Amino acid sequence: MDNVNPYRNDTEGYCIEDLAVCISASFAKTVTEEDIWLFSSVSGDINPVHLDQAYAEKTRLKGRISHGMLSASFIAPVRPGETVTARLTVAKVVPQRSRAILQTRCYIDETLVIDGEALLLVPTRHQH
């Protein structure tokens, strides 16, 4: 987390009582050739736009891209070798409903590639 919370339990995550507006976190991952090939194997998606550079260069994408669902797991479209950084910030906490609204932004370098919002159901401390 960018903002350290003394109540955080690293093995169980956060409880609704621990969240406050502006708490944020980041995760960065460089997509590798192995990631794409492994995802292709697991998903069965062997579309050449993911696996064949010569083919992919002839498409409107102008080169290979990772699988949409692989990218979605990082919340951003990324090419092999690119690093996506997902930044999540608590925008609103609704403790009576055990909900939090997160601002979700993903960047490749400094370019914003996804800007959105996520609604999460967050456990209370006595639910752990």
Image (cartoon, rainbow, N blue to C red):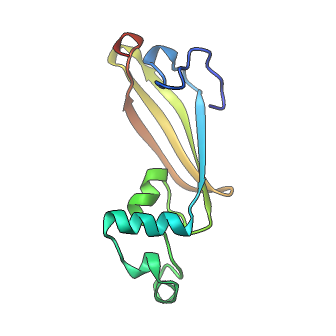
Answer with the quarter of the image where residue 112 lies: bottom right
Towards the viewer: 81 or 88: 81
Please, is residue 14 above or below residue 111 in the view?
Answer: above
Q: Residue furthest right?
A: 110
Q: Quadrant of residue 117?
A: top left
Residue at position x 53%, y 80% in the image = 63
37 or 100, nearer to the observer: 37
Residue at point 53%, 82% (across, down): 62
14 horizontally vs 81: left or right: left
Which quadrant does the C terminus fall into? Answer: top left
x, y percentage for residue 51? 45, 78
| Residue 111 falls left or right of residue 100 | right
Tell me which residue sits at (35%, 63%) in the image: 42
Relative image position of residue 45 (x, y in whole percent)? 33, 71
Which residue sits at x=47%, y=13%? 17
In depth, the one of 48 and 89 nearer the eye is 48
Count of numbered circles on the image:
0
Left or right: residue 5 compared with residue 9: right
Quarter that holds the N terminus:
top right
Query: Compared with residue 88, is residue 123 higher up or lower down, i.e. above or below?
Result: above
**Percent of width and height locating residue 119:** 38, 34
Q: Quadrant of residue 118?
A: top left
Q: How far across and down, in percent of the image, does residue 126 sit?
A: 37, 10
- Nearest the viewer among 108 and 123 is 123
